[in-house]
């Protein structure tokens, strides 16, 4: 177990409760730990770590120094996402629709000196290895889109009557002959240099009107395309044609080179803009379309030496030509930006950097780490945008090799410690290195990683970046940290909304365990539905889970029932036993706990029908059952006189022959017509036979969109489904 304890979530809570996060976090960890143990989870506590422990963050800081020494961590003045409410800057990944991911507070742009990690240096590597991962497709897609690799060209335009030039980034160099105007981002530094003063007022008014719009709003496809002419012209390098220069907010300063060549005939946004501003344009790709932009592939027209070429070939021809006249080149662009890594907060790893009075920056060495977070009376954000660490005077001022200096006061973001914790699990007490290389090579990569989908472009991207860096440093030997990834769903409140204190729909595990016991809670949660589904809590479901545990318990402890347990096998349970072991084994391996449990229920139903129950089958059942319900499972195991834990027992095996011998193929009908056959076990449970019948593809087709009135099952003979 690792406690990801630093960062905004813990700090926000501490502020709300008006307690120093230092005291607070340990108390919370104790409580979580008590609950985890109460629920019977099998964590190896000898491998426990917490990210806010100096023994742990020594290594988080150490990895930062490795990044710094390789030029992958740098500080610069930049326009950042600043959240006044949280009193800190946030990474792009932490801002959703102009609001903070934590708390949903407004975020504004503000220039500040910040630490940044060069994740862009790893953009290609982060993309390349994605396809080999056993991860949910949607998450892989999200990472790809977030990295946003775009292959195109950079083309140089010169400004008429001046020595100024600017570059545009385009993925459609083939359409260069159709460029009708060029468009700069309103904040482009060139604008003020080249504008015609006659237009200054309208330009200023326009800039003012858009200054608070987020990039997301600006690039929304269905927004009105606004912009103004700046009174200057540029030369299209391919044909020396003079084209007007506009500024428009649909062009973002932060992407490509902050300028576009506009081709209204073949780009939707440019088309809309040109129509609005009465800009004339010609098609350069053949098509029948004339009422909107034609954005498809085709053959070039009105394009001089590329006429008759298909656009892919034309692209190459145009770029090669531009290269030969020094007016452009191939260019790959990424949407990914470097990772803003500093926070003006107290509760994080101090960044191990000292700014010396002689102007140098000093990075702490391995043996100067950890740089411990000083204890402070006032840990709340200062409000000025500075970290509360500015108040730690003794800590702040240091002398390095005789030169006085001041420590960096920003701290690392909450994502830092979780970037590499899975490595530390292998060797949590190692004082000399991140972890023993032999252990790293033996254990990594992580075979199965279970975590929420909300981490798709945050933690899961950051951790891959650090891992790849550590790979390049020879610290880990595999290129990817997490081989298989699974996103679990969340349990919603009874009303179907996310559980939260403010909605008053939170279920406290302490209460449930008090009233029902831990096994009921565990069984209920695993039985609610597929692990990946988000489902509402239901108290009646909880009662059902409790009844099933009772039913199992009574077999062994009820006087009448337990008399039926026998050392003789009368073979009546052979089929259902073997089938159950087979299904539960494979379901467990595939994380399909709900269906494994329902098979165990079917088995117990069969057991209840018997007068004599073979004891070995029951024992094997308890082994499977105890994975979900360990407390009752161990108690039953103990009642057989066993002194060791059932946990150490060998997993039950099944006999494939027993499944074959007693199976039979029966017909499945829908409204009396034969639609398929299924293989069932003789005397297989009715519910399970019906379920099998409904799984046949041709049956599914027949009943799609209809109501099932009833399913008639003549045991071991036929299933007939009646629909309306
Ligand atoms: C001319 C052109 C003609 C374009 C055409 C498209 C179609 P992706 O794929 O996302 O990389 N673009 C370039 N820089 C931009 C910026 N800073 N802000 C807004 N738009 C920008 O998109 C690349 C395309 O987005 C580029 O190709 C450019 O428009 C536009 F028929 O250039 B294109």
Image: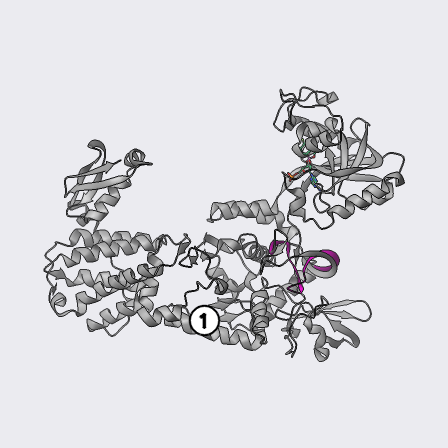
Label 1 neighbour load within 10 Å: few <14, some 14-19, many 20+: few
Location of residue 424 in the rendering, given as x and y in whole percent from the top left corner: 52, 66
- When the figure is inspected, residue 284 is found, relative to residue 464, above or below; the finding is above
Identify which residue is drawn at 62% across, 48% down.
Answer: 123
Q: Main secondary structure of the magenta part?
A: strand
Viewer can see residue 40? no
- Horizontal side, residue 617 vs residue 66: left or right: left
Location of residue 260 in the rendering, given as x and y in whole percent from the top left corner: 73, 37
In the picture, the quarter occupied by the C terminus is top left
Viewer can see residue 288? yes
- Horizontal side, residue 208 vs residue 531: left or right: right
- Horizontal side, residue 585 vs residue 29: left or right: left
- When the figure is inspected, residue 191 is found, relative to residue 301, above or below; the finding is below
- When the figure is inspected, residue 235 is found, relative to residue 711, above or below; the finding is above
Label 1 belongs to which residue? 32
Query: Which of the 4 quarters of the picture holds residue 223?
Result: top right
Ligand 1's image quarter is top right
**In the foreground, 468 or 386:** 386
Location of residue 134 in the rendering, given as x and y in whole percent from the top left corner: 46, 49
Query: Which of the 4 quarters of the picture holds residue 527?
Result: bottom left
Q: Which residues are magenta?
A: 74-94
Q: Let me know if residue 82 is in the magenta part.
A: yes
- Horizontal side, residue 316 vs residue 230: left or right: left
Q: Let me know if residue 69 is in the magenta part.
A: no
């Amino acid at each position: 177990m690792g406690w990801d304890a630093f960062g905004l979530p813990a700090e926000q809570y501490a502020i709300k409760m008006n307690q120093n996060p230092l005291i607070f976090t340990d108390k919370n960890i104790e409580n979580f730990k008590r609950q985890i143990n109460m629920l019977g989870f099998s964590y190896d506590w000898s491998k426990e770590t917490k990210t806010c422990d100096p023994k742990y963050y020594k290594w988080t800081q150490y990895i930062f120094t490795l990044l710094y020494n390789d030029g992958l961590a740098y500080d610069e003045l930049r326009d950042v996402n600043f959240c006044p409410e949280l009193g800190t800057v946030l990474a792009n990944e932490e801002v959703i629709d102009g609001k903070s991911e934590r708390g949903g507070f407004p975020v504004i742009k503000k220039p500040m000196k910040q630490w940044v990690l060069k994740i862009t240096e790893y953009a290609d590597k982060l993309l390349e290895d994605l396809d080999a991962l056993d991860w949910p497709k949607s998450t892989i897609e999200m990472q790809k889109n977030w990295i946003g690799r775009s292959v195109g060209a950079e083309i140089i335009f010169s400004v008429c009557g001046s020595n100024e030039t600017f570059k545009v980034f385009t993925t459609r160099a083939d359409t260069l002959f159709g460029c009708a105007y060029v468009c700069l981002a309103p904040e482009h530094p060139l604008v003020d240099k080249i504008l015609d003063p006659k237009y200054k007022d309208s330009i200023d008014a326009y800039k003012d009107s858009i200054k608070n719009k987020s990039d997301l709003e600006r690039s929304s496809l269905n927004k009105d395309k606004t912009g103004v002419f700046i009174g200057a012209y540029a030369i299209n390098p391919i044909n020396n044609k003079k084209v007007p220069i506009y500024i428009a907010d649909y062009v973002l300063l932060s992407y490509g080179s902050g300028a576009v060549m506009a081709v209204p005939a073949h780009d939707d946004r440019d088309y809309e803009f040109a129509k609005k501003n009465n800009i004339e344009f010609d098609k350069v790709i053949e098509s029948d379309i004339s009422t909107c932009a034609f954005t498809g592939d085709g053959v070039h027209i009105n394009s001089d030496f590329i006429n008759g070429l298909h656009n892919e070939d034309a692209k190459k021809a145009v770029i090669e030509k531009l290269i030969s006249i020094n007016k452009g080149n191939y260019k790959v662009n990424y949407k990914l930006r470097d990772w803003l890594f500093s926070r003006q907060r107290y509760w994080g790893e101090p960044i191990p950097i000292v700014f010396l009075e002689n102007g140098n920056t000093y990075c702490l060495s391995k043996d100067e780490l950890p740089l411990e977070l000083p204890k402070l009376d006032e840990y709340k954000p200062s409000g000025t945008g500075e970290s509360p660490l500015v108040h730690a005077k003794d800590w702040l001022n240091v002398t390095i090799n005789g030169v006085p200096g001041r420590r960096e006061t920003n701290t690392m973001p909450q994502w830092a410690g979780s970037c590499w914790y899975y490595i530390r699990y292998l060797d949590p007490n190692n004082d000399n290195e991140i972890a023993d290389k032999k252990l790293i090579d033996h254990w990594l990569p992580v075979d199965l990683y279970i975590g929420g989908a909300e981490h798709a472009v945050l933690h899961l991207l950051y951790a891959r970046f650090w891992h790849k860096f550590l790979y390049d440093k020879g610290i880990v030997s595999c290129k990817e940290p997490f081989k298989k990834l699974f996103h679990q769903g969340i349990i919603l409140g009874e009303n179907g909304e996310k559980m939260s204190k403010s909605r008053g729909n939170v279920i406290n595990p302490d209460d449930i365990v008090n009233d029902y016991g831990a096994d009921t809670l565990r069984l209920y949660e695993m039985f609610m539905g597929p692990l990946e589904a988000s489902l509402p809590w239901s108290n009646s479901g909880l009662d059902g889970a409790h009844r099933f545990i009772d039913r199992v318990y009574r077999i062994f402890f009820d006087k009448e029932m337990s008399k039926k347990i026998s050392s003789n096998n009368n073979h009546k349970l052979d089929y259902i036993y073997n089938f159950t072991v087979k299904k539960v084994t494979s379901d467990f391996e595939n994380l399909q706990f709900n269906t494994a449990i329902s098979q165990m229920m079917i088995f117990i139903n069969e057991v209840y029908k018997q007068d004599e129950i073979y004891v070995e089958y029951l024992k094997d059942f308890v082994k499977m059952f105890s994975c979900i319900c360990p407390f009752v499972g161990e108690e039953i195991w103990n009642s057989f006189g066993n002194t060791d834990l059932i946990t150490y027992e060998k997993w039950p095996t099944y006999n494939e022959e027993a499944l074959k011998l007693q199976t039979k193929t029966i017909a499945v009908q829908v409204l009396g017509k034969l639609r398929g056959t299924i293989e069932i076990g003789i005397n297989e449970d009715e519910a399970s036979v019906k379920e099998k019948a409904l799984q046949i593809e041709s049956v599914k087709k027949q009943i799609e969109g209809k109501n099932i009135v009833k399913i008639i099952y003549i045991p071991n003979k036929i299933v007939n489904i009646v629909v309306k």
